[in-house]
Image (tube, rainbow, N blue to C red):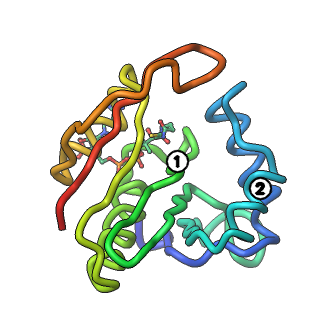
Amino acid sequence: MNGELLIGRVRWWHLAEMARMETAIFGPEAWSEGLLWSELAAGHDYRAVFDRSAGGPEGRIAGYAGTAFSDTEAWINNIAVDAGYRRRGVATMLMDDLVARARAGGAKSVFLEVAVDNVPAQRLYDRYGFYGIGVRKNYYQHTGTDAAVMRMDL
Ligand SMILES: CC(C)(COP(=O)(O)OP(=O)(O)OC[C@H]1O[C@@H](n2cnc3c(N)ncnc32)[C@H](O)[C@@H]1OP(=O)(O)O)[C@@H](O)C(=O)NCCC(=O)NCCS
């Protein structure tokens, strides 16, 4: 079934669909379409997994990830998978892709923040060898949940 799932670059015309996904996935913590626009405008690299068997000409977005790259570091700003596509390796496709590009670009480390109670995401990051380097208290505004800051060495 994953043969119909293809990874590609996010363009501005994908942002409305992604904003709807943000609301469904993150509720009050969702990023708005405007914030997603500013992520692209800032030059951050967004990739999506498209389900070519569904939706319009490009397919339906199953998941996406946004990364800020610098010379020696990559920061994963956002990663999310539609509830109907989970446990099918979509996040793994996105992570494999961004880690490979970070490595190819000469990055030495990948960083991210994750809610301390987000077990699925932490399991995913464990698989890549991320380890905790700190905690940001009350990082998520609506719940007051702390975020763990994690690092992976390339
Ligand atoms: C976390 C998330 C991105 C994972 O996406 P996914 O496409 O389902 O992940 P994958 O199918 O690639 O899973 C890879 C591995 O991650 C771990 N994992 C993923 N979901 C899990 C869950 N619900 N429970 C436990 N482990 C989980 C498993 O080790 C899994 O491998 P397996 O299926 O062979 O056991 C997805 O659950 C999601 O979008 N959650 C809501 C948004 C979010 O929390 N984003 C992260 C913010 S930091």
At mark 1, the secondary structure is: strand
Check disc 1 and give the amino acid type.
Answer: Val
Q: Residue extending furthest top?
A: 143
Q: Is residue 133 left or right of residue 47?
A: left
- In the picture, the disc for residue 81 is 1
> Which residue sits at x=64%, y=60%?
61
Q: Is mark 2 within 8 Å of ligand 1?
A: no
Q: Is mark 1 within 8 Å of ligand 1?
A: yes
Across and down, in percent, residue 95 comes to 36, 61
Q: CA distance from mark 2 to mark 1?
A: 13 Å
**Image quarter of residue 92:** bottom left
Q: Is residue 9 left or right of residue 120?
A: right
Across and down, in percent, residue 53 comes to 61, 68
> Which residue sits at x=70%, y=76%?
58
Residue in the foreground of this view, choosing between 130 and 106: 106
> Which residue sits at x=28%, y=82%?
106
- Quadrant of image for the N terminus: bottom left
At mark 2, the secondary structure is: helix
User: Going from the N terminus, do you reach mark 2 or mark 1 first?
Assistant: 2
Assign ligand 1 to one image quadrant: top left
Examine the rendered structure and indicate whether residue 118 appears above or below residue 97. Answer: above
Q: Name the residue carrying label 2.
A: 17
- Quadrant of image for the C terminus: bottom left
Check disc 2 and give the amino acid type.
Answer: Glu
Across and down, in percent, residue 151 comes to 26, 50
How many residues crowd around disc 2 within 10 Å: few (fewer than 14), some, or many (20 or more)? Answer: few
**Image quarter of residue 59:** bottom right
Residue in the foreground of this view, choosing between 62 and 132: 132
> Which residue sits at x=68%, y=69%?
42
